[in-house]
Image (cartoon, rainbow, N blue to C red):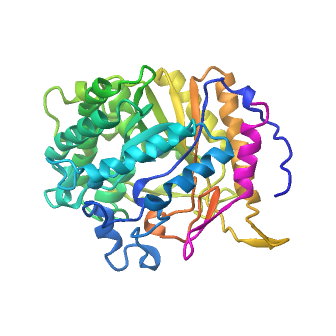
Amino acid sequence: MSAEPKPELARSDFPADFAWGVATASYQIEGAVNEDGRSPSIWDTFSHTPGKVDNDDTGDVACDHYHRYKEDVGLMSQLGLNSYRFSIAWPRIVPEGKGEINLKGVDFYARLVDELLEKNIQPYATLYHWDLPQVLEDKGGWSNRDTALYFQEYADKISRLLGDRVKGWITLNEPWVASILGYLQGVHAPGLHSMEKAVRATHHMLLAHGLAVPALRRNALRSDAEVGVTLSFNYIEPGRPGAEQLAQLKDAWDNRLFLDPLFKGAYPTELYPILSQYLPLEREDMEIISTPVDFMGVNYYFRTLPVEWADQATMSFKDRPNEGSEYTAMGWEIYPEGLYQLLTRFHRDYGIKKLYITENGSAFQDSVVEEDGNNFVHDAGRKKYLQEHFGAALRAYRDGVPLAGYFVWSLLDNFEWGYGYDKRFGIVYVDYPTQKRIIKDSAYWYESLLKSNA
């Protein structure tokens, strides 16, 4: 490995207790889908349905993290990380979705958490990163209000068992993606096309979050334990003169559909004509949904510039490409200024008392090269992406945003949902046939930042 030059950013620019981390998700990395009592999730069903995932890829093996977690934690330790955000697979813990707990499933996460703590890496556990037990989807999934109650039960059970060790509890990851892409646009599991079910799923995920927060607080025994939620955001600007109202509506749909109920206790007024037809609102729901949290996680990747409707039935918009901008392999515009603008907006308009960047990263066409008998991945695009976005985060922090941590997406190349294994987001390359891990240049840059003045 060649010596990485000292980054312009320094660790000391950020708070002393800043969470320097990486993030992953259970179905994307674990594999072992049929081991130790785990039941099928909606993503097992979806990925095994021909034509739903590129190349008909599945998460059956993924990164084999279930068996290689010690190696992966060792990589985190080598890089100097002090935090790790992972997700717990509901089908491993409660295979029937409700009722009896699966202790073998719990044991895996207990061993993972213990390994992390032994390496001085703080665990941040996400309870739902899209892998709903299929048995619950068979009963209506998130469109069924009972699923929110089952989630509360699951959250209570797993936090009773791990609450003495986990520092951060995140109820849901990107529920907008799960509800809108899963129940309306059909490109994610469970692959449905129903506005009614999407609206019901949205409300019930919010309700599930609100119901789970008190249970997590009760069971989180660490004095520094925190409970929060992670939402997805994109930075939206009008794509042409006269598209201001369209951009505002897209912002309400993409960004505020979950943000406003959680932190203002109400759905965006712009969306009432759509939501009011299907919203399964019951008395006290909004009070439960807006239960105070300790932090919000921000997942940010790109900017969009809407110019016109693509399909009003699915609330889809056409965006214009921005000439002169760089784009990732996902076709997403690289726009670090958007991260700064969003962070300052959340602080200014919502008064959220603590923010974490729980996902930020990029996919590029990585390749392995051999030099002097060793393998390298020179991912200059990803390194630049991270440098610029860390810089934007630092600006926000210096402008008063209560930013407490940054989790790069992702530790490993992995199963990228509908794209299968074609898109690589990892700072560590995974050769899937051999499961060999190769640290990329972006990870070495991150390491140099973490060790710049540690």
Q: Which residues are magenta?
A: 430-454
The quadrant of the image that shows the N terminus is bottom right
Could you say which quadrant of the image residue 47 lies in? bottom left
Q: Nearer the viewer, residue 234 or 435?
A: 435
The relative height of residue 384 versus residue 220 in the rendered view (above or below) is below
- Residue 441 part of the magenta-drawn span: yes
Labels in figure, total: 0
Whether residue 308 can be seen here: yes
Residue 14, x across and y down, in percent: 68, 27
Residue 365, x across and y down, in percent: 66, 68
Could you say which quadrant of the image residue 316 lies in? bottom left
Q: Residue at x 68, y 36 (%)?
A: 392
- Residue 237 part of the magenta-drawn span: no
Whether residue 173 can be seen here: no
Q: Residue at x 66, y 23 (%)?
A: 16
Q: Residue at x 41, y 55 (%)?
A: 26
The relative height of residue 41 versus residue 161 in the rendered view (above or below) is below
The quadrant of the image that shows the C terminus is top right
Residue 180, x across and y down, in percent: 34, 53
Residue 94, x across and y down, in percent: 22, 50
Q: Is residue 277 left or right of residue 375?
A: left
Q: Nearer the viewer, residue 68 or 311?
A: 68
Q: Nearer the viewer, residue 100 or 347?
A: 100
Q: Residue at x 72, y 44 (%)?
A: 447
